[in-house]
Amino acid sequence: PGVGALLQRIDEQQLANLRIVQHDAVEVLRDMIAPSTLAAIHVFFPDPWPKKRHWKRRLIQPPFVALLASRLALGGTLHCATDWQPYAEQMLEVLSAEPLLANTADGYAARPAYRPLTKFESRGLALGHGIAHDHTAASPQDAAPPPAQARLQARVAQEVEVFRWCLDWLE
């Protein structure tokens, strides 16, 4: 949903433990989110840029995935979904190549029961597209954070149950 719909749902559910940032995801992650602090990151149906000459514009690229992985707390999850099979294959390849991440499924994961269908997912299903989910976790071989950072991570994880990026260019 757009920011307005998101704000309406927040009000309806009387949520007070979240932050909304409508800005470029790379800048937000790089400049506003400390390393090893996020419990989960969800990237649902980013633009697949189907033409080969535009693939460089795809969001799920090695540098961005490395940045995402660096912001995940130990055991945190990165969940990506797309309805464009060639992009799903590229996403799985890029995510599998990131040393800080480990795939939690054998290939693609099933859609979690807790996640409602998105507008893009519904449209893709109506068009007969399969939906691919990549679900990875911060690798357990990562070193444990220092105690002060661990306390900060625990506090951030308690305060932030919902973290959503509203990117105009993804919608």
Image: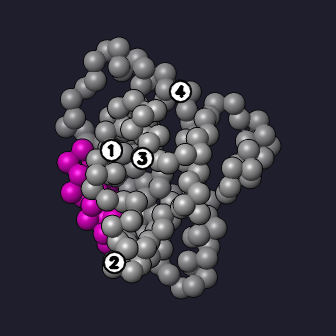
**Label number found at residue 53:** 2
Marks 4 and 3, the one that precedes in the sequence: 3
The segment highlighted magenta reads: 89-109
The answer to whether mark 3 and mark 2 are in CB contact below 8 A is no
Q: Which quadrant holds residue 79?
A: bottom left
Where residue 40 sits in the image (x, y, percent)? 45, 43
The answer to whether mark 2 and mark 1 are in CB contact below 8 A is no
Residue 52 or 144: which is nearer the viewer? Answer: 52
Q: Quadrant of the C terminus?
A: bottom right
Image position of 98 (left or right of 163): left
- Alpha carbons under labels 2 and 4: distance apart: 42 Å
Mark 1, Cα crowd under 10 Å, few <14 / some 14-19 / many 20+, is: some
Residue reaching furthest front?
Answer: 53
Task: Please identify, in this view, whether the residue under mark 2 or under mark 1 is nearer the observer.
Answer: 2
The answer to whether mark 1 and mark 3 are in CB contact below 8 A is yes
Where residue 66 sits in the image (x, y, percent)? 28, 47
- Residue located 74% across and 50% down the image: 4
Residue reaching furthest bottom?
Answer: 128
- Residue located 31% across and 15% down the image: 147
Q: Amino acid at mark 2?
A: Arg
Q: Which residue is mark 3?
A: 26
Q: Which residue is mark 1?
A: 67
Q: Amino acid at mark 4?
A: Gln
Q: Amino acid at mark 1?
A: Leu
Q: Amino acid at mark 3?
A: Val
SS label for mark 4: helix
